[in-house]
Amino acid sequence: MARGVGSQIAMLAIVTLILILVTSTLLTLTGLSPQGSDGQPVSFGRLVWLGLMHAIDPGAVGSDVGSWSFLFIMLAVSFGGIFVFSALIGVLTGGFGEILDRLRKGRSVVIERDHTVILGWTGKIHALLAELAEANANRPGASVVILAEHDKVAMDDELRSVLGDVPMRVVTRTGSPLVRRDLDLVNLGEARSVIVMSPDGPEADTVVLKTLLAVAKAGDKAGKQPHVVAEIKSEKTLSVARMVVGDAAGLILTPPLVSRVLVQTGRQSGLSVVYTELLSFSGDELYIQPQPQLVGKTFREALFAYEDSALVGIYTAAGERLMPPPLHRRFEPGDQVIAISRDDDTVVANGRPTPVADDVLAPLHPHATPKPERTLVLGESQLLPLVLRELDAYVAPGSTVLVVGEARHLEARLGGDELEHMQVQVRVGDVTDRAVLDGLDVAGFDNILVLAETEGRTQEMTDSRTMITLLHLRDILRRQGKSVPITSEMLDGQNRDLAAVTEADDFIISNTLVSLVVSQISENQRIAAVLDDLLSPEGHEIYLKPARDYVQPGADIDFYAVVEAAARRGEIALGYRLAARAHDPEHAYGVVLNPRKSERIRLGAGDRVVVLAEH
């Protein structure tokens, strides 16, 4: 009786048939069958029919006529029918219960189409879903299907409590992304994109590779390979993963991404907000759009042709990315613009520039020669070697960096790294210990980076240690009457509001940063290469430079004037940051990305201009 509902129903039907056939045969052989209306004994077929009616309806025994032996036999058939149908009710109830239980456990095949599939469950899932919901706000019926080795009810409850009501259908299924049968539950053949989350632990890349193999195999069966986006943690794994999924897939090497943004932000306060605004679907985003009306115009002319968009590059007909192109480069047939805009339908050549008076522009000054710097890095992390290499690419020769962290892994993490421009000093200690921090002379450094110490700790414990370190640093600097830019890595974006009391200059929410990049690439696979160009230390990058280097402080100008001032320096103006709102989260910490160029603004001496520049 443990084979399933269908088998159990068939078995009960066989028992009923045997009961009827046996009693009908017995009545025929013993001559106990009643007489019909013609005075002849009832036929065998008629006895089978009577037996079936008694088995189905026990009340039929009340209308029987015949010998007592016949009546007792038919009564036995009725009792047998009662037993069989009681068992049938139990089987059907159990079967429906199994179906409901299977649905509750997330073991049914989804019916969604053109959906996003997320394979795995990590701390990044909440930020990722929030971004996907924002990205699909204009797509009626948009849906996301999650397959993870977690209880479906627990996943649903957690998502409901964290995300609340989102304008997007989220379906969860319990299963392993490594198992082909489980992958069939999420309808990969009809998915618009597949996101492979990297789990926590030392074997994360191994799990991701196996998942990519399973997805590729499922795609072969369906006859269609979906657009795949995956997190990779080791450069050694990247080439192998590329062989599995091909060049079209979006493979994100997350540790270099986080360390790069951390170092860049540590050198320019407010840059993390710029990246968040640029990568988040709730703000202005990057778009690649054909603009045939620009053919024949120079890129410099095109900068002023858009009121509501900021051009950052050209995507040529040959697939080459120019980020940015030379300002004198003319658009050719088939070229597309790479632009920052509110939406894809707002990339419209509607600019109306006005002549810019030279007296509102700041005079050109040669770039200052970089000086050696002293940087303090607190915390031992897997990112530490990458952070040091990124930092070495920016600092002037003769710079120094002091690394403070726990003894068990610190020396091993730094072993073998050769740096060109700076000397690394190591000091063992607990970065949450006030005595250790008091002995560092933190006021004597040019920049301070605080890394999240994740190994062997939960996300909450890691962020708590980070906040303790930040509180100590601010107290030390306040007592000495000094100010040093502090940039900190945190894991949970919800802890940023709590950490605001530490008055750190910038926070890199690494989980959120990765989620933003993953969601962008899942929606548009061509954006992956564009983001890589923007975040790379080679070529042009995003900088926040003093506004006084571009326009006269306090001058009443529009943003076209800022665009002109930046163009004269071979740069592209993308926005600005107001110092008065640098600590106001309601106004994006003072960052205004892609402003309407005709709006009048006044930039003070402490404000900054967001530019795409080479240095």
Image (cartoon, helix red, strand yellow):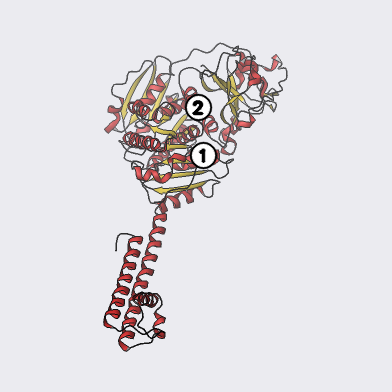
- Please identify the quadrant where the N terminus is shown: bottom left
Q: CA distance from mark 1 to mark 2?
A: 18 Å
Label ID, residue 131: 1
Residue 380: % across, % down: 34, 32
The front one of 301 and 190 is 190
Q: Please indicate whether residue 606 sits to the left or right of residue 477 in the image.
A: right
The answer to whether 385 is drawn above or below residue 158 in the figure is above
Q: Is residue 141 left or right of residue 400?
A: right
- Residue 84, by quadrant, is bottom left
Q: Position of residue 551 (x, y in %)?
A: 64, 19
In the picture of the structure, the residue carrying the numbered disc 2 is 526
Q: Amino acid at mark 1?
A: Glu
Q: Is residue 4 above or below residue 567?
A: below
Q: Nearer the viewer, residue 445 or 275?
A: 275
Amino acid under disc 2 = Arg
- Pointer 2 local density, CA inside 10 Å: few below 14, some 14–19, many at least 20: some
Quadrant of the rendered image containing residue 179: top left
